[in-house]
Image (spheres, rainbow, N blue to C red):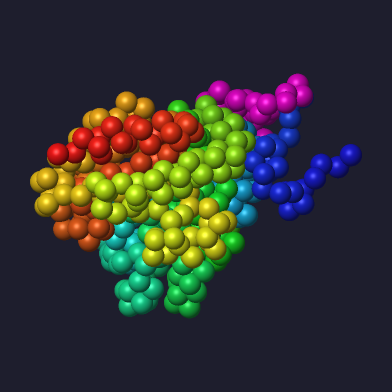
Amino acid sequence: MNPAQPQDLHPDTLAVRQALPRSVYGEHSEALYLTSSFVQPDAETAARRFAGEEDGYTYTRTSNPTVTSFEQRLAALEGTESAIGTASGMSAILLMCLGLLKAGDHVVCSQSMFGSTIKLIGGELARFGVESSFVPQTDSSAWKAALRPNTQLLFAETPTNPLTDLCDIAELAAIAHDAGVLLAVDNCFASPALQRPAMLGADLVIHSGTKFLDGQGRVMAGAVCGPRSIIDDKLAPLIRSAGVNLSPFNAWVVLKGMETLRIRMEAQSANALALAQWLEAQPQVARVYYPGLTSHPQHALAMRQQSGVGGAVLSFDVRANGPQEGRARAFHVIDSTRVCSITANLGDTKTTITHPASTSHGRLTEAQRQAAGIGQDLIRVAVGLEHIDDLKNDLARGLDTLS
């Protein structure tokens, strides 16, 4: 019987089944190939494989069967031709930039992107002559106005970390393509369970597999998904030289995590919606940021673009008079929790809570944080699978005792 092809199967099935064929041993779970190198049948075959003239595994820094299974599964879920695994989400962004940009090129990014992304593109790459502009995430006219003759890439994160701002991916793709440039979208918060940027016109999709793809906070992983002309021809040769490749063990862990991605995202998003609605009713909460709420300015876009689901991450401002009091009151709420884990990671089955201004975005300047809307009174909650009543009670412990 011929196996079903990826285009014939639902993404839920691909999340469980897409991988390399079984080995001669017939293993049901995908094999973990813990090896640094691969023995060649003869010197001539080795020469052809190292020259790229023949398919075959040579060295794990270049490729590995377990990593290939991860890449094939993620590409199938995102609906792209290809994908390449990396050591972390940030290394995926670095690989994309190294593969597509050179001195004198220009990239336009959302000013609401993850703090490390802003530091990498606006700081580190600038040392090598790559220019950058950061624009308001939701202002399409600002994206268009920032374009220059030397612009090569538009890079957005939707929803953003931590304020859950969205961009209209299809609209941004049209702006990019009209200008003859590429659009890359960081899909970490939504994951392909809720959102498939390539289906909306994005050229490249970035992932931190450390987050929802794994789902249990176990390993570091990243990936870039896109057309073979970019992934295979531009990024794959570079990863061989740069060494930012994904380890086989981490690939195997995330590969297994992806099997439960949709059911986790649905359950965690349902918890997040319930918690966001509860937070909106709390007198000590000034504002809740969550795309699933009708009060979110881009709620309609979120429902259309994210499969009618708000996602599993929310943020909220505690009521305060000024930044100093805001920081103290936010810290009080965070320190009063007993169920939530105080950690900046997200995408875990365990709910995590953090103060973005001093953790995930702590390396930004105050001006950069203000531009991104990240105040000292802001708390981010990445909602897990605990019972919703326990999560409400955990946050109430701090909110109810604010002086």
Q: Where, by quadrant of the figure, is residue 255 drawn?
A: top right
Residue at 60%, 25% (x, y): give it.
32
Q: Position of residue 392 (x, y in %)?
A: 38, 36
Pick the front one: 58 or 308: 308
Can you say which quadrant of the picture contains the C terminus?
Answer: top left
Can you say which quadrant of the picture contains the N terminus?
Answer: top right
Pick the front one: 45 or 198: 198
Q: Position of residue 287 (x, y in %)?
A: 29, 54
In the image, is residue 374 above or below residue 89? below
Region rendered in magenta: 25-45
Q: Is residue 130 left or right of residue 260?
A: left
Pick the front one: 47 or 312: 312
**Any part of residue 94 in sight:** no
**Any part of residue 321 in sight:** yes
Residue at 12%, 45% (x, y): give it.
325
Q: Is residue 197 left or right of residue 134?
A: right
| Main SS category, magenta section | loop
Q: Position of residue 249 (x, y in %)?
A: 52, 27
Residue at 45%, 70% (x, y): give it.
172
Q: Is residue 273 left or right of residue 117?
A: right
In the image, is residue 197 above or below residue 318? below
Q: Is residue 205 left or right of residue 124?
A: right
Please identify the residue farthest to the right as the structure is shown.
1
Q: Where, by quadrant of the figure, is residue 335 drawn?
A: top left
Pick the front one: 247 or 358: 358
